[in-house]
Amino acid sequence: MTKTPLYPDTPIPLLAYVALGANLGDRAASLRDAISRLSAVPGIEVTKVSSLLENPAVGGPADSPPFVNAVAEVRTTLDPQALLEALLQVERDMGRERREKWGPRVIDLDLILYGDRIIDTSALKVPHPLMHHRDFVLKPLAEIAPGAVHPVLKSTIAELAERMTRGAGGSPVLPPPAGDDAKPQLFLRPATNADGPAVRDLVFGVLREYGLKPDPCSTDLDLFDLEGSYAMKGGRFDVLVNAEGHVLGSVGLMPTGGGSCELRKMYLHRSARGHGWGRRMLDHAIFEARRMGFTRMTLETASVLKEAVAMYEKYGFRKYTPEHTVDRCDAAYELFL
């Protein structure tokens, strides 16, 4: 027998998580002010707040001052759109002006999780499509909600934070073979738009090395907005860096629909070739594609890249005929995952 609730019109509160950031004025005071304002909104109860962490600005102008970031847990009866509007109103009340994408700001409030809901509208995307690529979100979120589960990736926040830590430093994601002490240690980490110039130098340099023409207005336009072209569309873009942070490799996974993703911009600087890094990058890409739920991987390449073509075929990629290919590519391959 189904019980009828005593108050059927009363919304049931759920937990949501809000990322906060500021890099203008008294940053810590701005975060505390924003939390206080959120607490005063009917239907919102702030139940936990992480430590305040200082982080370099990501993706904005090179001279942007560092941010202070935090994450707040809220218990709310507001629906997602109403909660988003409440966050935007707090930003407006505190003087936030949206003049420049990723530019300096007095306050920034992002809804990153809303229960276990997956929301994809023009106005709101939850989980936040970049949260699992951002240490300044994962670290404070793991502090207050390590067991919360990302509803798309099906991993806990603690697991995602630990993967980010491995990729940003510490032990290399792509270790050299045992006993090869002379090989430099390289690290694979998620790219941000701040990596764009270095990635473009790498990719365009390799293309010219093989007599291929860069196409910044079409085929290579994705390199001018790495986050928007990949992570924000449900994919990822990673860079291979050395201990000094120089970009020596790149590899991207771009969703193409129907459970497929395209392997894009997988290139290595000449100084990193011949040591097995290409195979390790491809291993990583295939692993991540499977983890993200893709069932098919495609790629387009030029036959002049003989070493890369041989590697793809060794991994089981088979030629297929797509509807169209880009001008500089004369071969297409697919791999069912």
Image (tube, rainbow, N blue to C red):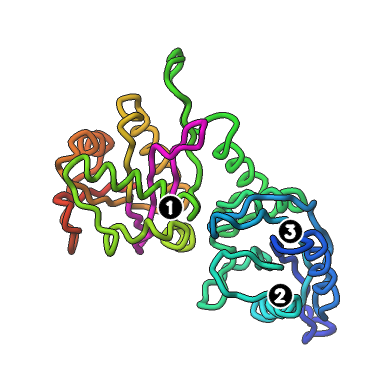
Residue wearing tag 1: 196
Mark 2 or mark 3: which comes first in sequence? 3
- Judged left or right of residue 300, residue 268 is right
User: Answer yes or no: do the residues labelled 3 and 1 have beta carbons within 8 Å?
Assistant: no
Q: Are marks 1 and 2 in contact (CB under 8 Å)?
A: no
First of labels 1, 2 by sequence position: 2
Q: Quick one: SS at disc 2?
A: helix
Can you see residue 118?
yes
Q: Tell me if I can see residue 21 in this picture.
A: no
Q: Position of residue 249 (x, y in %)?
A: 38, 39
Of the residues shown, which amino acid type is indicated by label 1? Gly
In the figure, residue 257 lies in which quadrant? bottom left
Name the residue located 54 percent from the left edge and 39 percent from the top edge.
167
* Mark toward the viewer: 2 or 3: 2
Task: Give residue 113's position: percent from left, percent from top.
Answer: 65, 64
The residue drawn where x is 55% and y is 51% is 133
Identify the residue position indicated by label 3 in the image. 71
Q: Amino acid at mark 3?
A: Val
Read off the residue under disc 2: 91
